[in-house]
Image: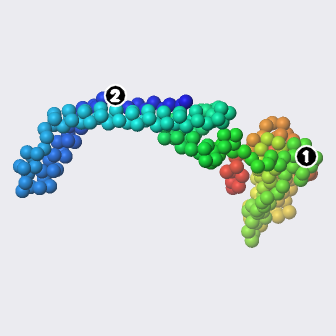
Amino acid sequence: MRFRRWPRPTRYEDTPRKRAAFVRKQHLEREALPLFAEAVAQRQPDIETEMASRAERWDAREQATRQTRAERWRDGRARLFALPDEKRAAARRLWRTCPYPGDPSSFGDFLRGIADGRIDPSQPPWVYVPLEPARSKPSPATFDQAFKQIGQRRVGGGPKTTGADELLFVGNLGTGILFLRSRVRLSDPRESFLTSSNHRLRDSHVGRAGHWVDIVVAGACDDAQLAQIEALAQAADTRPVRVRRGHPARLYRRD
């Protein structure tokens, strides 16, 4: 069984703050009925009597709470041992790992869920079980077999600009979903796709130094898979290809 120990005090704590709050409460009661302030004050207990009464009520309430909690635990254990042996053993194992709080109310709800069929001990609702295995291609022969294009946009498009296509791919090489962002880069950092034609020295010289393909991979990918992606992409393109890791939220970053 799992028990949760709450850091509750064992006795009522008489503090100056509680005394000040009680004095303020009595003052507000007298101010609420100014014509009967003296009569109200006569019926108000003194602070020492109030603190002693609170301590007694605290002990009685704590005793009743512990008794009620113990009764609920006993009721839960009785229902647990009323189950067949195999089902009882499965319920005990499941209770040790379930996300329910370790209190008798949650334990009772847990047992009711098993009794009415809402909770299957062999397949609890808080454990995700995929309906079918993820589609993966651990040994693809080409880049098109490994990844599927799911997005495309124009980077730097406009009436006086020459842009480059940015492509988004998705695939699975066996360890999980991978997202790829492919973008063409200029080899010469002094050149730019975003330079308007009337600001270039000669339009025909733009891109003269060549292009290369920058691929950013987001997802669980080890070094071997990273090299495999680069080899597949290089075989599908005549330009130099560079593959690097990235973050899914930055795949469409404007950089």
Say what secondary structure mark 2 lies in. loop
* Residue 223 place in picture, x, y as percent: 81, 36
Q: Which residue is mark 2?
A: 10
Q: Which of the pair 25/244 is nearer the observer?
A: 25
34 lies left or right of 125: left
Would residue 254 be visible to someone looking at this image? Answer: yes
Q: Which of the pair 210/64 is nearer the observer?
A: 64
Q: Which of the pair 201/22 is nearer the observer?
A: 22
Work out which residue is located at the far bottom of the displayed protein and give it.
Answer: 159
Q: Is residue 45 above or below residue 190?
A: above
Residue at 84%, 59% (x, y): give it.
205
Residue at 80%, 54% (x, y): give it.
169
Q: Which quarter shows the N terminus?
A: top right
Q: Identify which amino acid the numbered label 1 is placed on.
A: Pro
Q: Dot 2: few (<14), some (14–19), or many (≥20) neighbours within 10 Å? A: few
* Residue 133 place in picture, x, y as percent: 80, 46
Residue 140 numbered tag: 1
Work out which residue is located at the far top of the displayed protein and give it.
Answer: 10
